[in-house]
Amino acid sequence: MEKYMPYLAVVVIQSIYTGMFLLSKAAFDDGMSTHIFVFYRQAAGTLFLVPFACFIEGKNSPPLSFITFCKIFGLSLLGITTSLNIHGIALKYTTSSLAAAASNCLPTITFFIAFLLRIESVKLRTCSGVAKITGIVVCMAGAATMALYRGPELHLLLHHHLLSSHADQLNVTHDSSGYNWTWIKGVLLMLLSICCWSLWIVLQAKVLPSYPSKLCFISLQCLLSSMQSFIVAVILEREAYQWRLGWNIRLLAAAYCGFMVTGLAFYLQTWVIEKKGPVFLSLSTPLAFIFTTISATFLLGEIIGIGSVIGGILLIGGLYFVLWGKIKEEELLGNKLRTLEHKGNTSANIT
């Protein structure tokens, strides 16, 4: 039973992200400010993470220099505050299923940024290098397809609107007659959000060695992003009633994203990476797209266009091309190291 636990964990992780896409979209369609939502989400995540960080790593955490603090502040501003605020606006313009599909771009864009920063390399004369380049091209084609081609709509028999306000939003985000510039703008903002997220992942590898306490590292970023998000919300949102939370979808969405996504999903992802590696976790990301598409259709009444389905499939294909190339490179590197080790042992035995 224990060997199946990582597989169960990735299903739970992607189910949590499905809930995030659905509840966030429902809250935005109910009229909640995206900027205030980000603040409440990060505040809830901070309340969850900081006590654990203090209890588990508080006594053993290394001293935090001013330069390292500035780097962490910049990371939280770019990869959390900016990324989540842009993502919220994009989600308001599009659908939860598109947000889930676009998340499959993350490994591909992360690799591309790492390549531009010369952290990753591509050998064009090898199968792995060709696979990586193919994955980037296919991913770009998928993003362009989702933005520019809507196509015929897929109408299922059962549509139940979780919120009546969501039904009104369908007329805005789903217009098959010609180009919908609101939709295109939403897709571009979604990709920009993922680029910020990818850059955050890449830059963390540069900053983390100077402050290796991972839980404190993430908790500090969450705390800083809460402060940053509060300032952004105060500047951009002038309506006082937007800050009020009742026993409604807004409170549920903010609490869920803070506790379940920032808290539980973070822990499960760390556990899965430790057990099976980051590639195994990345291979599971299409599950969120499948779960969200089905759930959004039946619960929120989202009407899925053929273009979104084709674009999502292309994004998943690009993801697997890049991951396959990465796996092959790691296998070749492992074989070379084993060969060198074998030669070294043979030479030692001879002498």
Image (spheres, rainbow, N blue to C red):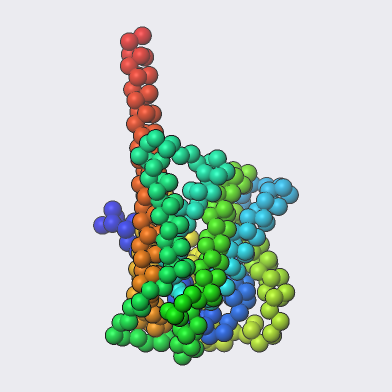
Indicate whether 302 appears above or below 308.
Answer: below
Q: Residue at x 54, y 49 (%)?
A: 113
Indicate whether 70 appears above or below 243.
Answer: above
Q: Residue at x 39, y 35 (%)?
A: 125
Q: Nearer the viewer, residue 239 or 126?
A: 126
Q: Nearer the viewer, residue 182 or 294?
A: 182
Give the side of residue 58 with respect to residue 286, left or right.
right
Indicate whether 201 appears above or below 102.
Answer: above
Q: Nearer the viewer, residue 200 or 126?
A: 126
Q: Residue at x 46, y 39 (%)?
A: 122
Q: How many marks?
A: 0
Q: Nearer the viewer, residue 98 or 64?
A: 98
Furthest residue toward top = 351
Indicate whether 144 appears above or below 341.
Answer: below
Query: Where, quadrant-wise, is the C terminus in this rendering?
Result: top left
Query: Where, quadrant-wise, is the N terminus in this rendering?
Result: bottom left
Q: Is residue 138 visible?
A: yes
Furthest residue toward front = 178
**x, y percent for residue 196:** 58, 58
Furthest residue toward bottom = 164
**x, y percent for residue 99:** 46, 69
**x, y percent for residue 300:** 41, 82
Give the side of residue 110 with respect to residue 210, left or right.
left
**x, y percent for residue 260:** 47, 69
Q: Residue at x 71, y 70 (%)?
A: 231
Q: Is residue 51 visible?
A: no
